[in-house]
Image: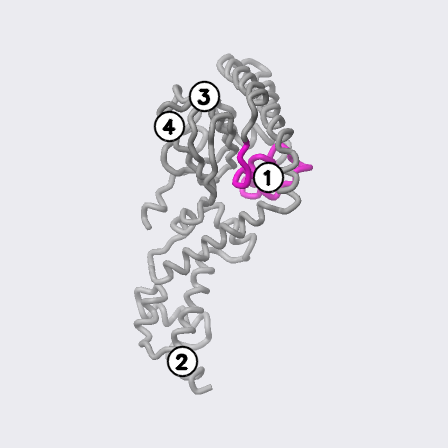
């Protein structure tokens, strides 16, 4: 599991020439070819070369004339073929949403009425944003204007860059209006969170006997950043990851104590405790009785 926890998170200073907005093609910097996440927003535009994108828990087609919208802290990777061509835009939350002070972990909860520009980012796991040639030609024109401006910054350039960026996003919102509104009405992002929590639950169940199980491993298995998983668990369950794991381990321990004759040392091991004495202390704190007494009381009852 150690490799799962090594998925990197990048800041703008690590992958961009500027801290607010950065646009480039593949000649400026090689693409990241392994799963990663970053603290900023990203849009990738495929100018040629069919591939796929892995984003969150979804795998979606990423063909020519397709745009990908990636929220901060969202695990993703887009393998680019050698003969492919793409443009990538990185931009900070402060640059993009200056009017909306919001924890980046809560962006999926912002209503479309409050921030319609977030729509493609919120529902990227549910839609493929493919444009016809006419609409894509407009996007290419906007990209060219952004690249020219970004190379010659002056007072007001940031405002113009943001204007062109919003035009690009607005074009996609126009084309996919019906689908985006339907996804918003059905609260698709909440289904996505439930799916993510289900992946976390499955991971805990499968690794319950491993005393080395960590938040980072569970987050990677659920295609989330550790910070986002912590935030999501508190929001949806009111518990931390450690509390959730301990509750599952105690539940499993109670089941074994009541329904089997296995020794306490064995039960401690299968519940993820390397030390029997520590298991007994945690069990007593959680259940009011040490394991042996708990077993006798429930068997006698």
Q: Position of residue 19 (x, y in %)?
A: 48, 26
Q: CA distance from mark 2 to mark 4?
A: 60 Å
Q: Position of residue 146 (x, y in %)?
A: 53, 18
Label 4 near label 2: C-beta < 8 Å? Answer: no
Residue, far bottom: 300
Label 2 near label 3: C-beta < 8 Å? Answer: no
Q: In the image, is residue 46 above or below residue 256?
A: above
**Residue bounds of the magenta highlight:** 101-129
Label 4 near label 3: C-beta < 8 Å? Answer: no
Q: Earlier in the sequence, mark 3 or mark 4?
A: 3
Pick the front one: 208 or 291: 208
Q: Position of residue 95 (x, y in %)?
A: 56, 28
In the image, residue 37 lies in the stretch drawn in magenta? no
Residue drawn at 43 percent across, 21 percent down? 25
Q: Position of residue 111 (x, y in %)?
A: 65, 40
Secondary structure of the residue carrying numbered label 3: strand
Point out the frontmost of discs 3 and 2: 3
| Residue to which mark 1 is pinned | 102
| Residue to which mark 3 is pinned | 24
Q: CA distance from mark 3 to mark 2?
A: 64 Å
Few, some or many residues within 10 Å of mark 1 (<14, 14–19, 20+): some
Point out the frontmost of discs 2 and 4: 4
> How many numbered markers are drawn?
4
Residue drawn at 36 percent across, 78 percent down? 260
Q: CA distance from mark 3 to mark 4?
A: 17 Å
Q: Earlier in the sequence, mark 1 or mark 4?
A: 4
Left or right of 231? Residue 171 is right
In the image, residue 118 lies in the stretch drawn in magenta? yes
């Amino acid at each position: 599991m150690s490799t799962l926890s090594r998925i990197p998170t990048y800041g703008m200073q690590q992958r961009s020439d500027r801290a607010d907005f950065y646009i480039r093609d593949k000649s400026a910097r090689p693409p990241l070819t392994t799963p990663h996440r970053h603290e900023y927003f990203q849009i990738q535009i495929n100018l040629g070369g069919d591939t796929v994108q892995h984003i969150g828990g979804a795998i979606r087609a990423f063909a020519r004339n397709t745009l990908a919208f990636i929220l901060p802290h969202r695990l993703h990777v887009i393998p680019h073929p050698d003969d492919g061509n793409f443009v990538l835009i990185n931009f900070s939350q402060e640059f993009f949403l200056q009017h909306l002070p919001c924890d980046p972990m809560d962006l999926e909860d912002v209503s479309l009425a409050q921030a319609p520009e977030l729509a493609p980012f919120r529902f990227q796991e549910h839609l493929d944003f493919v444009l016809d040639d006419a609409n894509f030609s407009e996007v290419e024109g906007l990209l060219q204007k952004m690249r020219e401006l970004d190379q010659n910054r002056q007072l007001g350039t940031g405002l113009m860059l943001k204007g062109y960026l919003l035009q690009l996003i607005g074009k996609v919102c126009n084309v996919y209006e019906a689908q985006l509104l339907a996804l918003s009405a059905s609260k698709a992002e909440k289904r996505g969170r439930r799916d993510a929590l289900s992946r976390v639950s499955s991971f805990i169940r499968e690794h319950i006997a491993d005393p080395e199980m960590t938040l980072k491993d569970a987050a990677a298995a659920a295609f989330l950043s550790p910070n986002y998983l912590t935030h999501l668990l508190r929001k949806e369950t009111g518990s931390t990851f450690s509390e959730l794991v301990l509750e599952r381990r105690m539940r499993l321990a109670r089941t074994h104590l009541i329904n089997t004759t296995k020794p306490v040392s064995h039960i401690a091991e299968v519940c993820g405790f390397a030390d029997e004495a520590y298991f007994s202390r945690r069990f007593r704190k959680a259940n009011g009785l040490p394991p042996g007494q708990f077993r006798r009381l429930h068997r006698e009852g």
